[in-house]
Amino acid sequence: MKVKSVTTSVLMVSILGMSALNIFHLIQTPKEVELDNPTQLETYFNENFIGKIQFVDFYGVIQKWMGKNEVDNFDVIRDEQGKLHFSYFSKGPNDMSEINQEMKNFKNYLDLYAVDVAFIMPPDKVIKGYTTFSKGLPYNYANEGADEFLRKLSEDKIDYLDLREDILQSGIEPSDLFFDTDHHWTPRTAFWGFTQVVSFLNERYGLVLDEGYTDLNQYEQISYPQSFLGSLGKRTGYGYAGMDDFIVIKPMFETNLTYTWDGNTVTATFDETVLQTHWLSEDLGIEADHYMVYLGGNYGEVRIKNNLYENGPKILMIKDSFMLPLAAFLSTTVGEMKLIDLRYYEGGSLYELVPMYQPDIVLVSVSPSNLVPEFFNFSKGE
């Protein structure tokens, strides 16, 4: 009781002090901000909140002292292994019928051009056989939704690779499969996923990708200890969640790629194209998103050409952010890749893109928590 009283007192004094600073700051609001416009005032205050990072961190420390496994009204929860998750209360998995129908329609169209399509299911941070939660915490049923989605793909005779199945046999410690403070897999786990995708494409589709490039011994691993605060950690503060180590994996063998993204085109090595190390700069502080070091982040459309394998297979990949590191690794084994993120894509319908691009195979990859129509709007722009 005494500890809770002291904690409450410290919290109240800190909040009052920070509030006083921000009230004074608010008095000096620029003239262009209308004080009688609540929306404009709220936006200005949120963007100019003095000590915002410190406040979030202090709030997180208080939550940790109180032994809470949820922050921000259950928007972020902590599992019994110490990892953070986005979550919400749900009675069951989302309805998958709409996106399954989109996949079926798209496959039927690709069949007209004799182009194969396969779905790559990334692992979810809630790992079956490893992740556990305290009683009373919400659960989003992402894995159950993914199970239903894949079941219907199988029924519709659409091929898939489920990377959730063997992840605990990957040789990676379960605690290292995902970041503690971010919702993404680590580059090491993404590299394992890359090895599985190469084997899958070779065995099922005869693409003859060089599996020598899947040997981790051919890559340099550079560690940045306690340097990364992920998307979840930014909501709780690093005092609650701690900081993650970040490991950059890059080829030691010869590479020559042409990378086109966001109006830029660069021809150079892997390190100078798809690996964008400015995201690791200490100048960015804890706001830096290290995960964006691969491909520079999410863009509507990017193209990677492998100049050392110009006659290699051409892949069209429709993806979310989980594929950023995996696609970077995969680019060393193929002739060319075009990556589409339908959230930001402005190039029109993919039904029109396929006959123009003429890929050898189309890969669709969306993580379990993103199995929603936004990522499957293949006729976007029609």
Image (tube, grey):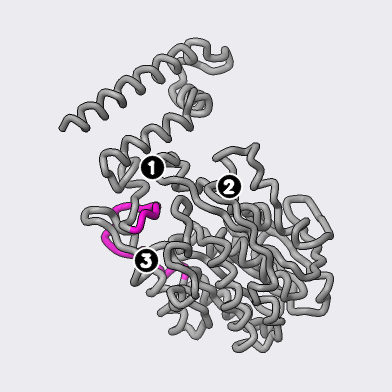
Relative to 109, is 76 above or below? above
Secondary structure type for disc 3: loop
Percent position (x, y) of residue 10? 30, 24
Binning the other alpha carbons within 10 Å of mark 2 as few (below 14), some (14 to 19) or many (20 upward) gives: some
Q: Can residue 378 be seen from the camera position used here?
A: yes
Query: 228 and 123: which one is in front?
Result: 228
Secondary structure type for disc 2: loop
Relative to 14, is 209 above or below? below
Which disc number belongs to residue 240?
A: 1
Q: Are marks 2 and 1 in contact (CB under 8 Å)?
A: no
Which residue sits at x=56%, y=72%?
192
Q: Amino acid at mark 2?
A: Asp
Q: Are marks 3 and 2 in contact (CB under 8 Å)?
A: no
- Over which residues does the magenta segment extend? 81-99
Query: 66 and 157: which one is in front?
Result: 66
What whole-number distance in Å separates the C-alpha atoms at marks 3 and 2? 32 Å
Residue carrying label 2: 289
Which label lies toward us, 3 or 2? Answer: 2
> Farthest residue toward the left?
1
Which label lies toward us, 1 or 3? Answer: 1
